Amino acid sequence: MWNLDLKKYSPVYLVKTPITPWIVNEKFMPQLQANAAFVKQLIDSYPHKKRGVMNWIKGVFHTPVEALEEVDVLKYLGLKTIGTLGGAFVDQNDFDRWIAVAEVALPTERFYSKPFLSLGSSRHVLLQDVQLKGVGRNNLCIDQDFYHSWGGLVMRDALKGYLSMLVANKKTKLGCLNILGLFNYTDVPAGSPPLTLVVRESNSFRLCQIDSSFLTDTDIKVVKSFLTKSFPGLNPQEMLEKIIDHYIHAYSVGVVHRSPNKENLLIDGRWIDTESIDFKMDSSALYPFLKIVVPCPDQDLPNNFGKTFAEVTQGEKDILFYDSWIHHLYFMCELTFESYQNLWPEDIDGLNDCFWKIMRTYFSSEALDVWRTQTFHLISNNQIQFCSQTQDELDVFANISELAGTCQDFKCIGHHYDPTLGGMVYTFAQSEEDIHQVVNRLLRKWEISFWPGEKNWQEAFDQARKAIATIDEIIL
């Protein structure tokens, strides 16, 4: 995530704060110690003059640091931001006093892709080869979505991300960025649940960092070099096909990333933000699903959970197509394809033939053909928001009698009201089993089993071994 043009990063001002180890894989201790030593070195050399700090960061970020066992990992990885500067107007003195309390500044990524231009990692910071997540609000935290704007990470989401990471690494071909450990903040706001600091690998690049409008020649060289080392002996088209195969294979063995976009997909195909991953216990494929929008006012919203597609849509007009399992898979491939074309415009072939060839490796023609012929010309909501293949509004879901027949007995497994679309977004699936709810039920058990409390290092190591054993036991 580091090493691109300096304009793709923003400084985050931080102070030390107490943390305790919760779930830590012991094999990553040398890496944790090296990054703690790196933070100590930066704090010791942090300049008194805080303006222009990104140039200082650029100068010190490649300073070699060895893992030092005597360095207190908890002392130097226990970081939180100084928050954001409040008020409608501030003057220079206010700004200088605000950043003067910082003990160190570290970079975080800026996002340069539709629709997140100039936003970025609003609760993260980068170290030499890891990223800290959940460190608090920074100056990129300007989203109106509270979940991505409040700055922290609750214990439950962190635990879900850790266990989902283990599942994905076990069941899929390319897996995820490894989480080295989970740590809990000692000082949290009154009434807050435990807040967790996630330490995960950062040895890749998000797709949102590889937008053609903002790629420099140096960026391209850096990313190409990274991919050549990640996929030795493969040409660019083979790299892309390996990633597409990973996405489709994952779905065929019951693993899905619920929030695929340029922020959560990496250029080497691994996933990030693993708290958004759901999975089945066995290795069977996920069920086909369809999402539609049924117009309705925002009062007296209907509860159609458990009803069939035929029951919900009977007599309804102006239904809109929203998404399908085919579009979900294609969307991830489309985003990755676009980034590879930005890097190797002369070496990447078209996407469609490659996508359907690999789809037929894992799914029968009988399972695919009706979806391909009936829906593939429609544009999904994700494609409208994120892709170059865009239009002003969703497609009307009409005159698709063959697909309607296929889906008529699909059950509603979820719905929410979307005020921008003026209707209910329904998810219909071939089975009533909602794996998101299944994983949530498991998570409630895991919360009790892994409840943090006061942990020392040995207990944190034992928790990590217990987590691996738990996943090995339930995942067939």
Image (cartoon, rainbow, N blue to C red):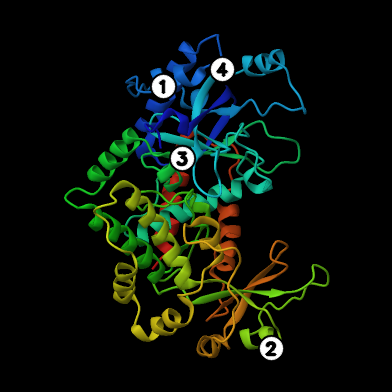
| Quarter assignment of residue 226 | top left
Amino acid bearing label 3: Gly
Which of the two marks, 4 or 2, is nearer to us in this view?
2
| Quarter assignment of residue 357 | bottom left
Amino acid bearing label 1: Lys
Residue count near mark 1 (Cα–Cα under 10 Å), binned few <14, some 14–19, many ≥20: some
Give the mark nearest the N terminus, 2 or 1.
Answer: 1
Drawn side of residue 346 relative to residue 170, left or right: left
Q: Residue furthest front?
A: 392
Residue 314 is marked as: 2
Residue 442 point in image, percent of width and height: 56, 62
Residue 58 is marked as: 1
- The residue singled out by tag 3 in the image is 181
Amino acid bearing label 2: Gln
- The residue singled out by tag 4 in the image is 103
Q: Residue at x 53, y 67 (%)?
A: 380
Residue 217 point in image, percent of width and height: 32, 35
Q: In the rendered view of the protein, which quadrant contains the N terminus? A: top left
Which of the two marks, 2 or 3, is nearer to us in this view?
2
Q: CA separation, marks 1 and 3? A: 27 Å
